[in-house]
Amino acid sequence: MTSQSYWSPLVRELVPYIPGEQPKVANLIKLNTNENPYPPSPLALSAMQAAVNDDLRLYPDPDATALKQAIANYYGVEHNQVFVGNGSDEVLAHAFMSFFKQNQPILFPDISYSFYKVYAGLYEVDYKTIALNAQFQINVEDYQQPNGGIIFPNPNAPTGCLLPLLEIEKLLQANPNTVVIVDEAYIDFGGQSAISLVKQYPQLLVTQTLSKSRSLAGLRVGLAIGQAHLIEALERVKNSFNSYPMDKVAIAGGVAAFEDKAYFQQTCQAIIDDRTWLTEYLESLMGFEVLPSAANFIFARHLRHDAEKIALALREQAIIVRHFKQPRIEQFLRITIGKRQDNEALVTALQSIC
Ligand SMILES: *Cc1c(COP(=O)(O)O)cnc(C)c1O
């Protein structure tokens, strides 16, 4: 017997996703996993504290109606056009199972969120990657080919580049017969959401997360918005998997996070301002090329220094950024926008390295 002989054939073939590291070291400047440097909304924190009470002996609402309604109110859609899950990763997994079991390969960019390949493996969905152009942008014409579905992040990860809404609309018009998923994990940092297109396009599903722009990565809340017939498919999969993915604390915190618009706008704006500052500094004073970013991170390469070496040297100074050993992007670093003092410490460290 080998150690894997009890495993199913599918599990033997799986190549799981590797999340960015969460080192258990204090005083590290952590710019590697696109977490928000600001704390969650104080209103969300007190709502969650209030939810920790004797009622936790009871199961939560399996529909998470209060959370769906808060999201529906925020975006001006109906309750039955909202799906919620345990992080948008779970929402995406259910979406792969709901929509992508087709007889054609699904399409996504060659440089993109690496979880898509993992879900394709888990659900045995064929895929074909479409190369970003030389500017690392999505060209929607390249997606006009037979497919079992299309998925891409907007802004894209790890490039940070935004695809304008008009281009998304072109793609939807050319592709009416299979589901198009726009993964908007970073949309609140300067992009326009495709949720405004949902009423016109029955094949459009938009996913978002509270992990990045709402500082709640630890809570695990994600969502999808689409026409009711798409949401119904997601509910069928969810109710065949786990009736209660949203716990009572997550529902309470999620509702309050959507209600506290002022805090949300203020923290997003601070990150956008610091992204502008860091981009200009790296480009004009330090010899970096920075792709135009609409996210809470930048994707940058130095014109003379090797990216992996820079990443290692930063680590020696207790700053971690993300480097991908992947063709086309091995000379780039993905750097999460931190608080102003973190970004300044990064610049100081880079000055000593480069
Ligand atoms: C972070 C991220 C997610 C997942 O977010 P969770 O809600 O924390 O699971 C999904 N898609 C992209 C592109 C991301 O960067």
Image (tube, rainbow, N blue to C red):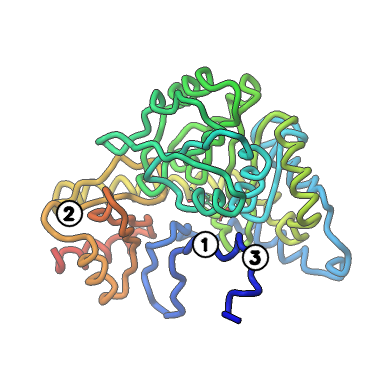
Distance between mark 1 and mark 3 Cα atoms: 15 Å
Residue bearing mark 3 = 8
Circle 3: residue type: Ser
Distance between mark 1 and mark 2 Cα atoms: 31 Å
Name the residue: 52% across, 62% down: 16
Q: Sort mark 2 into few (<14), some (14-19) or many (20+) by Cα contacts within 10 Å.
A: some
In the displayed structure, would residue 292 be above or below residue 180? below
Percent of width and height locating residue 323: 32, 60
Rendered image quadrant of residue 343 = bottom left
- Asked whether 122 or 108 is in front, the reply is 122
Q: Nearer the viewer, mark 3 or mark 2?
A: 3
User: Assess mark 3: CB under 8 A from ligand 1?
Assistant: no
Q: Nearer the viewer, mark 1 or mark 2?
A: 1
Who comes first in sequence, dot 1 or dot 3? Answer: 3
Q: Which element carries disc 3, helix, strand or loop?
A: loop
Name the residue: 62% across, 74% down: 5
Tag shown at residue 302: 2
Residue bearing mark 1 = 16
Circle 1: residue type: Pro
Percent of width and height locating residue 305: 14, 59
- Asked whether 26 or 152 is in front, the reply is 152
User: Looking at the rendering, in which quadrant would you find the C terminus?
Assistant: bottom left
